[in-house]
Image (spheres, helix red, strand yellow):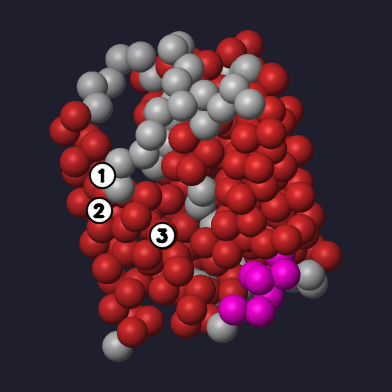
Amino acid sequence: MSLTDFLPADLNLTLALALVGLSFVTSLITATFSLGGGTLMVAVLALVFPPLVVVPLHGAIQLGSNAGRALVQRAHIQWPLVLWLSLGGLIGTVVGGQFASLLPATALQIAIGVFVLLTTWLPQPKLVGRSRLAQVLGGGVIAAVSMVVGATGPLVAVFIKGLADRRQLVATHAMLMTLQNSFKVAMFVLLGFAFAVYLPLILAMIASGFVGTAIGSRLLVKVPEAVFRWGFKLVLTLVALDLLREALF
């Protein structure tokens, strides 16, 4: 028995190891800069797997990655924000799940590519949703979108960017994404997605992601952002454009 016996039939060992390395890098990025790693993860996964596989697989991997980050930074979680946004998220997951199973593969790939471009380049307002109704509605809309495009970390961040302490922002974001991805994985199980086929890969990527989280948490208040942000935006843009090229041409 070799390592390839634990991988999906359409995935070779070299590519699997590259994805494990990707999980380390994306978790390092998210733990250091609050968000961005999940968007890069879904964009790269969309280059490797069929569109109908990308969102559930991304949800399972990000569940482990965000749970690790929330655990490491649990002392800084702002629980009132988590409560109301996640209540809406539970409702939105059920609604969004109906669309995720209906959209054709090409439409999903286009949606992911466009979503990556929009969240990379469009300005996002700073606000801390003080209205509980706004938090519930916002959480619901974001979770519904997440069932279709995968990475909605930048949208979640809209509701918490007003937090003054960067550690609170990162920790709260991690907890919100942990719950959102928990709802997402549960919904895809109900929809019949075969997670067992991908389980060894998912577990390996979660483990490498935890290492990235541990290192990124130490870098959180030390790394300058300006140069990194522009380079990161460029990488995301190139990946998103390649997704659109593949879908449209």
* Residue type, numbered disc 3: Phe
> Which of the two discs, 1 and 3, sits closer to the camera?
3
- The residues colored magenta run 97-103
Of 51 and 140, the residue lying toward us: 140
The x and y percentages for residue 196 are 75, 65
Question: What distance separates the C-alpha of mark 3 from that of mark 2?
Answer: 15 Å
The x and y percentages for residue 17 are 46, 57
Classify mark 2: helix, strand or loop: helix
> Which of the two discs, 3 and 2, sits closer to the camera?
3
Could you say which disc has been placed on residue 232 in the image? 1
Q: Please say if the residues under marks 1 and 2 sit with CB atoms less than 8 Å apart.
A: yes
Residue, x 27% and y 68% (percent of image)? 241
Left or right: where 106 falls relative to 231 = right
Q: Which quadrant of the figure contains the C terminus?
A: bottom left
Q: Circle 3 sits on which residue?
A: 115
Q: Which of the 4 image quarters holds residue 225?
A: top left
* Residue type, numbered disc 1: Phe
Mark 1 and mark 3 lie on one chain; the one further toward the N terminus is 3
Residue, x 70% and y 52% (percent of image)? 92
Q: Which of the 4 image quarters holds residue 185?
A: bottom right
Of 190 and 48, the residue lying toward us: 190
Classify mark 3: helix, strand or loop: helix
In this view of the protein, can residue 7 be seen by the observer?
yes
* Residue type, numbered disc 2: Val
In this view of the protein, can residue 68 be seen by the observer?
no
Left or right: where 100 falls relative to 193 = left
The x and y percentages for residue 41 are 45, 53
Q: Circle 2 sits on which residue?
A: 235
Q: Residues within 10 Å of mark 3 (few under 14, many from 20)?
A: some
Residue, x 39% and y 42% (percent of image)? 36
